[in-house]
Image: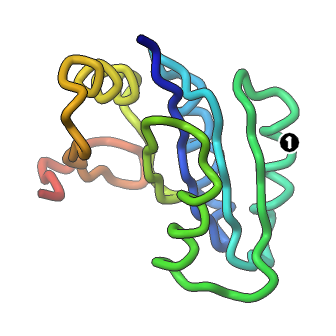
Amino acid sequence: MDARVSIALCTYNGAPYLLEQLQSFCLQTRLPDELIVCDDGSTDDTLRILDDFARNAPFLVQTYTNDHNLGYARNFEKAVSLCTGDIIFLSDQDDVWSVSKVEKVYDRFLLDRRLELVFTDAELVNENLEPIGINLF
């Protein structure tokens, strides 16, 4: 049985980082079915980058702009509530995902339908995306 995959991405003045993150979604070995973006009032080029990306993305992209700043936690709550997928990934605007992240998590959920949460670690990198030898967890 297939499961739909959503990514809940929260943004706030993330223009310097956002494009690499969005490109990493497109390089996934298992593409998401949708990307739901909740922007918390960006004043930089974040919304323009998202609009440009949405026009050519190989999956549905929906961007919502908050009327007022919700803050980190409430913005993610909103993004998750708008997702329609069975499996929901949370994403910060400055992450860059390894190409098999979605596929590995997706396969794990399909292997054991009792799972409610899968947690992944993060490899810290420098400004050139070169590993610095530290994992977040």
* Quadrant housing the N terminus: top left
The quadrant where residue 57 appears: top right
> Nearest the camera: 2 or 6?
2
Residue pictured at 13% horizontal, 53% vertical: 134
User: Residue 88 location, x and y as percent?
Assistant: 45, 43
Q: Residues within 10 Å of mark 1 (few under 14, many from 20)?
A: few
Foreground residue among 125 and 113 = 113
Q: Is residue 64 above or below residue 103?
A: below
- Identify which residue is drawn at 18% across, 24% down: 112
**Image position of 67 with respect to 36: above or below:** below
Q: Secondary structure at mark 1?
A: helix
Q: Is residue 34 above or below residue 73?
A: above
Residue type at mark 1: give it: Asp
Vertical relation: 123 (above or below) 3: below
Residue 55 location, x and y as percent?
87, 33
- Tell whether 92 sits left or right of 113: right
Q: Is residue 81 left or right of residue 65?
A: left
Q: Splitting the image into 4 quarters, where does residue 60 fall?
A: top right
In the picture of the structure, the residue carrying the numbered disc 1 is 52
Question: Picture coordinates of residue 20 (x, y %)?
Answer: 57, 42
Q: Would residue 71 be found to the left or right of residue 127 on screen? A: right
Residue depicted at x 62% and y 85%: 70
Number of on-image labels: 1
User: Residue 51 location in percent, x, y?
Assistant: 85, 48
Q: How is the protein colored in the picture?
A: rainbow
Q: Quarter holding the C terminus? A: bottom left
9 vs 78, nearest the viewer: 78
Left or right of residue 89, residue 137 in this image:
left
